[in-house]
Amino acid sequence: MAKTLAAITGVEGWVPETKLTNFDLEKMVDTNDEWIISRTGIKERRILKEKGKGTSYMASKAVKGLLEKTGTAPEDIDLIICATVTPDHIFPATANIISKDVGAVNAFSYDIGAACSGFLYALSTGSQFIESGRYKKVIVVGADKMSSIIDYTDRTTCIIFGDGAGAVLLEPSTEEGIGIQDQVMQSDGSGIEYLYIKSGGSVSPATLETVAAREHFASQEGRPVFKMAVKKMPEAVNKLLKNNEMTSDDVQWLVPHQANKRIISVVGKNVKIPEERVMMNIERYGNTTAATLPLCLADYENQLKKGDNLVLTAFGGGFTWGAILLKWAYDGSPKS
Ligand code: UT7
């Protein structure tokens, strides 16, 4: 009997309405539209402004939309995994709150933290439950309210990040060969010093001093992260293709993490996939961390065809990185 594969049978994205443009940022820090566009490709990002609303709010919007468009009853969901670095609270898990908000009363749920690779890690994890035959309907959501951990006096980070959420439904593939095929996943904790939040965890809990020193915001050394990102993503993609005896010609779509347009261009070049087959929406959303991949899939969904080979790749804090190969399950819009 052929192995059961996990197929993505629907995708939905959700972003807040409020836009933070490069021109807005010009009034906040010493920067300008031309610098931001030429160095990152970003024109605007979305910000969840309303007080008292966190990551689960955006994630639940995406999941509710996903349930509706796939005609799935919330009580039929077995598992919800939420990838995020901006949980509503340190505990309980944001996925627990999403489950409650969407009415997934029979699901168990938990969070995964792998920074910008979070969605990739969560997809890897969620697909195992389908492949093993344990569960039939798994939702993987990537969501981050990056505006809650960004220092809007730090021009090196505030220009990059935005808020958003995206979710996919995983089900056992009904057709042989369709679904998630393979993966190459890695991490290296020695990257911590280049991209992290210094305080607020168990090593350095919050004190008046840590707050005054602005240690609860994300800090990044951009150049070393850039260098590693353009090295590790192509390495993972090329290894994945080699392991599957494929070349870049066999890939219809590269779905890269949206951190910087220049990074995306180098990755595309180094894996020999031309621009027109590389998904990109960074111009409108910036880097939404765990949400970039599902937001790309949602934006390009109408252009996807059943049987298309997609390679998803990401790189982020940790360091964490990897690539997943999948054969897309449907044309245009999902079953309903
Ligand atoms: O998604 C998770 C992983 N994160 C990433 O993949 C991000 C990786 N890094 C990057 O995308 C880029 O490194 C950045 C976009 C963060 C920065 O771009 P860069 O081309 O690496 O710039 P840089 O840090 O080397 O800075 C170049 C210059 C510096 O001035 P000097 O020292 O040459 O005088 C910076 O102070 O640009 C200056 N600068 C700015 N100028 C205007 C830095 N930020 C800004 C700014 N506006 N916002």
Image (cartoon, helix red, strand yellow):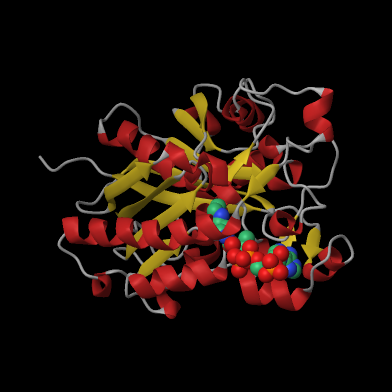
Q: Quadrant of residue 4?
A: top left
User: Does residue 166 appear anywhere in the picture?
Assistant: no
Q: Residue at x 39, y 66 (%)?
A: 254
Q: Is residue 130 above or below residue 209?
A: below
In-front residue for pair 333/328 = 328
Q: Quadrant of the N terminus?
A: top left
Tell which of 175 and 203 is nearer to you.
Answer: 203
Q: Position of residue 305 (x, y in %)?
A: 37, 67
- In the rendered image of this protein, does residue 272 appear above or below residue 44? below
Task: Kindly identify the residue that appears in the image at 60 percent across and 43 percent down.
Answer: 143
Identify the residue at horizontal 36%, vertical 33% (top origin). 136
Question: Which residue of the protein is positioned furthest toward the left in this rendering?
Answer: 1
> Which quadrant of the figure has residue 251?
bottom left
Residue at the image point whose x is 51% and y is 25% from the top = 109
* In this rendering, position of residue 56 left or right of residue 269: right
If the picture is divided into quarters, which one holds ligand 1?
A: bottom right
Q: Can you see residue 264?
A: yes
Q: Position of residue 287 (x, y in %)?
A: 62, 57
* Position of residue 313 measured from the top left corner of the image (x, y, whole percent): 40, 56
In the rendered picture of this protein, how many numbered marks are placed on residues? 0
Residue 310 image offset from top left, x and y in percent: 35, 62
Q: Name the side, left or right, on which 6 lies relative to 285.
A: left
